[in-house]
């Protein structure tokens, strides 16, 4: 009888205190409209993996390209009383973040942007990435040529890339930017970028009338590549660069065609660093660094680890 009572007591202890421990596990909400983007997928998956190791509860909310809907979702998680919010969106487009701050809920950026409401933003150095790829284009063209640019100003990490690239091209007298395009990014940007590039090719039919395509991320670069190949103009030597080095981009680079270079961001590292910053905050540490940068690498056919032909 004593043994049975002891077993029951142990089970009750496990249920009561085990349940309490589960309830005490931090709950983190990740809110983004960009989960269709491979880079965002990699970051979120890395964050989820790091959070799982720490025993956290993570809720990922994707508004599927609907940026205004982010506000309603932030309000929802504030009402739920989560322990932290991670955003992958321009903070200036999410005024509901003020409600999170008022409720005492810390906000962390995952390749987002800096703002008073964002405690720490973990990202890649967009200025550096844009400078490297734009300089690559200038050097490949020997400082002279006509360039098509693809950017996306509504999203700060991408907007700053365009600013730097434009400055570098503008500082090269014989480089002419003939178009700056903001594609529809609902599906990631490939389809609309292809359509927009097809129109530019049609408007500039002479061989040599387009020298390069600079894209602030890989999907527009891939769309431009598809348009160039479909038009039979891949032999004109149009140089294409992107940023992210996603699998499709790496495949294109390894093919040895027009898509020549991209920048590999450490998306897994960004997701892990966000989890690290949250862990430090939850442990009571005062975070003084508002922006944390993950390293990047220029990828060309020379270092792309291409499969043997």
Image (cartoon, grey):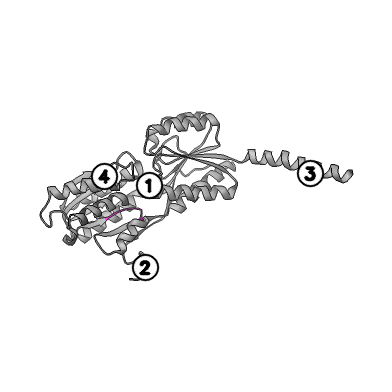
Q: Which residue is mark 2?
A: 307
Left or right: where 62 falls relative to 203? right
Q: Is residue 65 left or right of residue 78?
A: left
Q: Give how far apart the Cα atoms at labels 1 and 4 are.
A: 14 Å
Say which label, 2 or 3, has the lower sequence index: 3
- Packing grade of label 3 (10 A; few <14, some 14-19, many >=20) is few
Q: Tell me, yes or no, whether the two marked residues, 1 and 4, touch with CB atoms within 8 Å.
A: no
**Can residue 62 be seen?**
yes
Q: Which is more toward the observer, 278 or 173? A: 278
| Residues shaded magenta | 241-245
User: For mark 1, what is the residue?
Assistant: 37
Q: Mark 1 or mark 4, which has the lower sequence index? A: 1
Residue beneath the point at 11% across and 52% down = 205
N-term mark: 1 or 2: 1
Query: Nearer the N terminus, badge 3 or badge 4?
Result: 3
Residue 279 image position (x, y, % from top left): 56, 45
Q: Are marks 3 and 1 in contact (CB under 8 Å)?
A: no
**Residue shown at the point (89%, 44%) measured from the top left:** 2
For residue 192, the mark is 4
Q: Secondary structure at mark 3?
A: helix
Whole-angstrom CA distance, mark 1 to mark 2, is 25 Å
Secondary element under disc 1, as helix, strand or loop, is loop
User: What is the magenta segment's predominant secondary structure?
Assistant: loop
């Amino acid at each position: 009888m004593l043994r049975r009572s002891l077993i029951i007591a142990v089970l009750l202890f496990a249920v009561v205190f085990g349940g309490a421990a589960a309830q005490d596990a931090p709950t983190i909400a990740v809110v983004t409209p960009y989960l269709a983007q491979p880079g965002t997928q990699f970051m979120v998956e890395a964050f989820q993996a790091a959070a799982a190791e720490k025993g956290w509860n993570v809720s990922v909310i994707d508004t599927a390209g609907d940026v205004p809907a982010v506000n309603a979702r932030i309000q929802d998680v504030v009402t739920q009383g989560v322990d932290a919010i991670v955003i992958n969106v321009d903070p200036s487009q999410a005024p509901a973040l003020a409600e999170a701050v008022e409720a005492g809920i810390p906000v962390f950026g995952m390749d987002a942007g800096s703002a008073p409401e964002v405690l720490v933003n973990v990202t890649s150095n967009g200025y550096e990435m844009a400078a490297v790829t734009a300089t690559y284009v200038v050097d490949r063209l020997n400082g002279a040529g006509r360039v098509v640019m693809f950017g996306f100003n509504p999203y700060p990490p991408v907007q700053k890339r365009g600013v730097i690239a434009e400055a570098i091209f503008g500082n090269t007298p014989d480089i002419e930017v003939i178009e700056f395009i903001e594609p529809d990014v609902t599906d990631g940007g490939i389809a609309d970028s292809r359509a927009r590039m097809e129109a530019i090719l049609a408007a500039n039919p002479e061989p040599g009338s387009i020298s390069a395509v600079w894209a602030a991320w890989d999907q527009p670069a891939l769309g431009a590549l598809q348009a160039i190949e479909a038009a039979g103009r891949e032999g004109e030597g149009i140089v294409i660069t992107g940023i992210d080095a996603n699998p499709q981009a790496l495949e294109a680079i390894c093919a040895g065609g027009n898509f020549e270079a991209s920048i590999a961001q450490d998306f897994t590292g960004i997701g892990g660093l966000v989890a690290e910053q949250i862990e430090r905050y939850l442990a009571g540490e005062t975070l003084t660094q508002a922006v944390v940068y993950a390293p990047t690498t220029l990828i060309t056919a020379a270092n792309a680890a291409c499969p043997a032909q």
